[in-house]
Image (cartoon, helix red, strand yellow):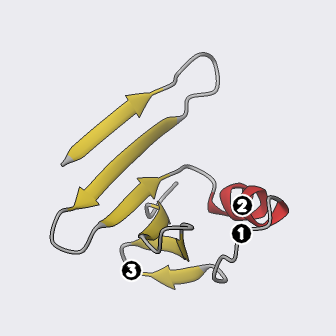
Amino acid sequence: MFVELDTRHGDGLTVTLEWDRDTGHTQIVVHDIEAAREQLVSRGLEVTEIQDFPWGRFVFLKDPDGNGWSIQQPPGI
């Protein structure tokens, strides 16, 4: 399943949610990985350090139910 939420009300932000049915893993695409990680950590979540890959910058975490989440900033953003 793939869902894109366009929240362009002056900030130019688009959040993309992608869910892998086989793994139960959900991915969120953001424009600022540092800000996203900082916000999650400030709310007490255990989040990995930012990891750089050719296909983007990522952080990973699990929600209270044990579901895996990744947050990606695509290359060039």
Vertical placement of residue 55 versus 36, above or below: below
Tell me the residue that label 3 is attached to: 54
Q: Secondary structure at mark 2?
A: helix
Tell me the residue that label 1 is attached to: 45
Vertical placement of residue 7 versus 33, above or below: above
Q: Mark 1 touching mark 2, by CB under 8 A?
A: yes
Tell me: 69 left or right of 64: left
Vertical placement of residue 50 versus 32, above or below: below
Tell me the residue that label 2 is attached to: 40
Kind of residue at disc 2: Leu
Q: Secondary structure at mark 3?
A: loop
Which residue corresponds to the image point at 48% horizontal and 68% vertical from the top-left? 65
Q: CA distance from mark 1 to mark 3?
A: 26 Å
Tell me: 27 left or right of 34: left
Circle 1 residues within 10 Å: few <14, some 14–19, many ≥20: some
Q: Residue furthest top?
A: 9
Q: Nearer the viewer, mark 3 or mark 2?
A: 2
Which residue corresponds to the image point at 44% horizontal and 54% vertical from the top-left? 28
Q: Nearer the viewer, mark 1 or mark 3?
A: 1
Kind of residue at disc 3: Pro
Task: Identify the mark at residue 6; answer none if there is no mark.
Answer: none
- Tag 2 or tag 1, which sits nearer the N-term? 2
Kind of residue at disc 1: Leu
Q: Give the x, y percent position of residue 26.
A: 36, 61
Depth check: give the residue in front, 3 or 35. Answer: 3
Q: CA distance from mark 3 to mark 2?
A: 24 Å
Which residue corresponds to the image point at 47% horizontal and 75% vertical from the top-left? 66
Tell me: 13 left or right of 40: left
